[in-house]
Amino acid sequence: MKLTTQNCLSAVVLLVLCSLAVSVQAGVEVRKFSSDEQERRYHKLIDELRCLVCQNQNLADSNSQLAQDLRDKVYQMVTTNKTDQEVANYMVERYGEYVLYNPPLNSITSILWIGPIVGLLVAIFLLLYNIARRSKAKPVTLSEEDRKRTRKLLEDDSADDQEDNDK
Amino acid sequence: MLKFLIPLLLFITLIVFLAIGLTNDPRYIPSPLMEKPAPEFTLPRLYAPTATFSPALLKGKVWLLNAWTSDCVGCRQEHPHLLELARQDIVSLVGLNYRDSNQLAKSLLDQTGNPYRIVVTDTKGSVGIDYGVYAVPETFLIDRKGIIRYKYIGPLGPDEIYGTLVPLIKKLKQEPA
């Protein structure tokens, strides 16, 4: 096979794609599970738990040492048949509710949960209020004089248009 | 007039909230361990690997648990301040060498001085997880009953030590065991 520019280019593209695939997989170790159910739960849990070091990544995405340790811990707890709730409680006891990407409803998180609903209700109220106000508004009435002026203006305008068209 | 005032007020409110957000440290996460008993553990000691240490041994005393590693920049920053605190001899400092190699930890302490009364080695990081350690250095102040009364994340400086820690330690020493 001759070494053409096209061949080189496709080789480069292939290399880039391979390296991308590796970096996406880097955070996930090969693990053995005794059932599909366990595997599904493990992946669901590491998706829903936040990595403390990297702020906006979950345990599944992060490469940090702590995330690796915590993935090990989740694996260990899942394979020893701990429930999802037990795993979540274990993390919350140590790192606080911050580790949960799906925080429970309580006094601290109430604004988070209720805020959007309140915002929506306020928006709907304002919308209905405005519609009601507009439909109640009296239609504008023109005096005979205004009507004459309007007609005159419109006629002048159409006359101008006519002129433009003639040109 | 009101038509312009309301959006303006909303905008100002938003700006105020965002400005407050900017002053917050995103690395700071309130610890659920505050006011809770310090988790028990038994770990080998760095300078006497056959001997172990556990928090129960210090029951009745006010002590500090400082999580550190030899490769952490913040730990080196706070190191001289910890040495100074150790010289004053007002509190027992216990070092939790977190996920580190014993050799590196020893050679660093040999070079720069050892502020700790006891250093324990948490090679696997399991005690770190129990204490919710996520960014070394972290410091826990434990009272005479074994309750965590204060936690500081990040390098301790003179302000934190003499402004907050030392007064709190003196207060906790007055409390009954």
Image (tube, coloured by chain):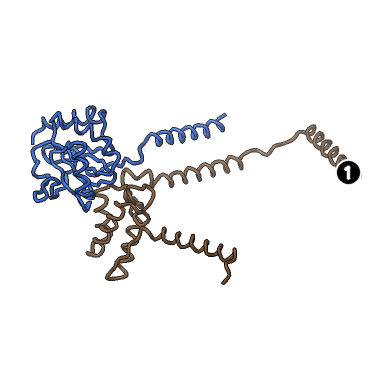
Q: Quadrant of residue B168?
A: top left
Q: Which residue sits at x=36%, y=52%?
A: A101
User: Which of these two is toward me, B174 or A20?
Assistant: A20
Label 1: which residue? A162
User: Which of these two is toward me, B65 or B106?
Assistant: B106
Q: How many marks?
A: 1
| Chain given the colour blue | B
Residue density around tag 1, few if under 14, some if 14–19, many if 20 or more, within 10 Å: few
Q: Residue furthest right?
A: A166
Q: Which residue sits at x=11%, y=37%?
A: B144
User: Which of these two is toward me, B52 or A43?
Assistant: B52
Residue type indicated by callout 1: Gln
Q: Percent position (x, y) of residue B122?
A: 19, 49
Of the chain colours in the picture, the one used for chain A is brown
Q: Residue furthest front?
A: A2
Q: Does residue B13 appear to the left or right of B43 in the view shown?
A: right
Q: Which residue sits at x=21%, y=31%?
A: B165
- Above or below B41: residue B142: above
Image quadrant holding the N terminus of chain B, namely top right
Find numbered disc 1 in the image and state the secondary structure of the residue it sits on.
helix
Q: Percent position (x, y) of residue B157?
A: 26, 31
Q: Quadrant of residue B177?
A: top left
Q: Does residue A149 appear to the left or right of B157 in the view shown?
A: right
Q: Percent position (x, y) of residue B10?
A: 49, 35
Q: Percent position (x, y) of residue A35?
A: 29, 71
Q: Does residue B52 appear to the left or right of B5 in the view shown?
A: left
Chain ID at mark 1: A
Q: Which residue sits at x=21%, y=36%?
A: B112
User: Which of these two is toward me, B167 or B76?
Assistant: B76
